[in-house]
Amino acid sequence: MNSESVQGVFPSMATALQPLSRSAKGKARTEKVAAYNPLASVWYGEDADLLERMLTFYPRRRPRKILDTTVNGGRFWRGSKRPVIGMDLNPRHHPSLVADNVTMPFGDGSFDVVVYDPPHIPNQGKDNKKDFGTRFGLVLRSSKENHYTFTHTFPPFVREAYRVLREEGVLFCKITDYVHHHRYQWAHIELINAARNASFMPCDCIVKIRQGPIIDPKWKTAHHSRRQHCYWLVFRKSKKCE
């Protein structure tokens, strides 16, 4: 807080040290309650709106430097005026920086917030009614050696995210569980485990509801429920969440 803002809150030290009257105390409590606006654990709106709420709610101070490590087309930041560096491996998205998020070209403790939205589902079919191929990485492949998942990319990423975050910095991750090779893939648990191993503190989870599940006409018989939600996970570079 700068000197001008301090003076705005406390016009003089003498005034600041005076005891509050009962009416003033009641007003202060009312204003504090009115300002407290926690997030719901289930979100039905757009990711950009949710991310803006998260950026207001979780960081201990207003983020001055934000890194989106998988910016893609930048849809998380539509209408945002926040200072964001968008990084992506694909230059066709015209990111601020073309780079790999497992070897980030930044110094230690460079950012207040890091955002991560990795490719969600490898080796799947296509849903011609939706743009999941572009948005969720349906076109990408994973080998048998990697168990047909992307979880092998989590540990090197979270180690780098931990390094480039400042102390008490926050990592926001969007992740989707899915069914592949007749098995349920617990991607969000794999990510939490990787983050714990990198010394992050897992602090919160928001369920984000989609308008419809990922489907394909060739999937004749389903033995699992259709995935119609994903998760936003919140991690802190700290020993505590509160």
Image (spheres, grey):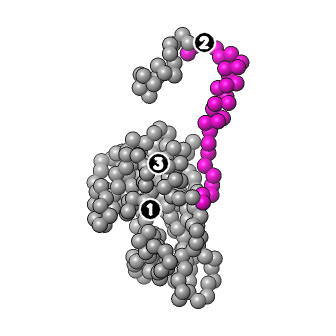
**Residue 74 or residue 168, whichever sits in front:** 74
User: Residues in magenta?
Assistant: 16-44
- Which structural element holds mark 1? loop
The first of marks 2 and 1 along the sequence is 2
Q: Which mark is residue 117?
A: 1
Quadrant location of the C terminus? top right
SS at mark 2? loop
Magenta region includes residue 31 = yes
Q: Can you give x and y, in whole percent of width and height, for residue 147 in the image?
A: 46, 78
- Dot label at residue 18: 2
The amino acid type found where label 2 is placed reads Gln
Report whether residue 159 is seen: no
In the image, what residue occupies the spot 54% across and 86% down? 217
Look at mark 3 in the image and give the residue it sits on: 170
From the viewer's perspective, is 22 left or right of 129?
right
Residue 72: quadrant of the picture: bottom left
The amino acid beneath tag 1 is Asp
On whether residue 78 falls in the magenta region, the answer is: no
